[in-house]
Image (cartoon, rainbow, N blue to C red):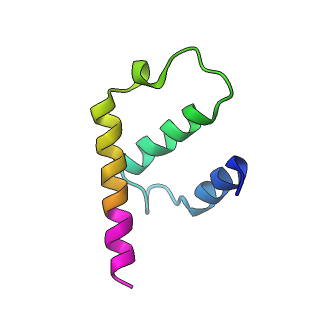
């Protein structure tokens, strides 16, 4: 899967605000930031590392809890 394919899949799955939360929206913005070919700032200067990790863990927990219900 290419980066563009992954981005397209995420955009198609997103039904704001029905299936999003603050953490998933934060990851969406981080992914857009990271996917840019060039950025003036390192990501650590945009967001606090603990905030980024917290959002990642929150989305992972939601994903794994949902998958565990199948």
In the rendered image, which quarter is residue 17 located in?
bottom left
Secondary structure mainly formed by the magenta segment: helix
Indicate the quadrant containing the C terminus: top left, top right, bottom left or bottom right. bottom left
In the rendered image, which quarter is residue 33 located in?
top right
Residue numbers of the magenta segment:
62-70
Residue at image coords 58%, 14%: 40
User: As drawn, is 25 to the left or to the right of 31?
Assistant: left
15 lies above or below 7: below
User: As drawn, is 20 to the left or to the right of 39?
Assistant: left
Residue 22, position as x, y percentages in the image: 35, 47
Residue 11, position as x, y percentages in the image: 61, 54
User: As drawn, is 56 to the left or to the right of 38?
Assistant: left
68 lies above or below 53: below
User: As drawn, is 48 to the left or to the right of 44?
Assistant: left
Residue 66 located within the stretch drawn in magenta: yes
Q: Residue furthest bottom?
A: 70
Looking at the rendered structure, the number of numbered marks drawn on it comes to 0
Q: Residue furthest front?
A: 1
Residue at image coords 31%, 61%: 61
In this view, the residue in front, 50 or 11, is: 50
In this view, the residue in front, 26 or 34, is: 34
Residue 16, position as x, y percentages in the image: 49, 55
Indicate the quadrant containing the N terminus: top left, top right, bottom left or bottom right. bottom right
Residue 60 located within the stretch drawn in magenta: no
In the rendered image, which quarter is residue 9 located in?
bottom right
Residue 10, position as x, y percentages in the image: 58, 56
In this view, the residue in front, 17 or 60, is: 60
Residue at image coords 50%, 38%: 29
Residue at image coords 57%, 63%: 13
Q: Which residue lies furthest to the top in this view?
A: 40
């Amino acid at each position: 899967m290419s980066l563009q394919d992954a981005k397209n899949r995420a955009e198609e799955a997103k039904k704001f605000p029905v299936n999003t939360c603050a953490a998933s929206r934060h990851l969406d913005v981080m992914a857009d930031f990271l996917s840019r070919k060039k950025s003036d700032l390192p990501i650590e200067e945009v967001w606090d590392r603990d905030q980024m990790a917290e959002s990642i863990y929150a989305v992972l927990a939601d994903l794994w809890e949902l998958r565990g219900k199948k």
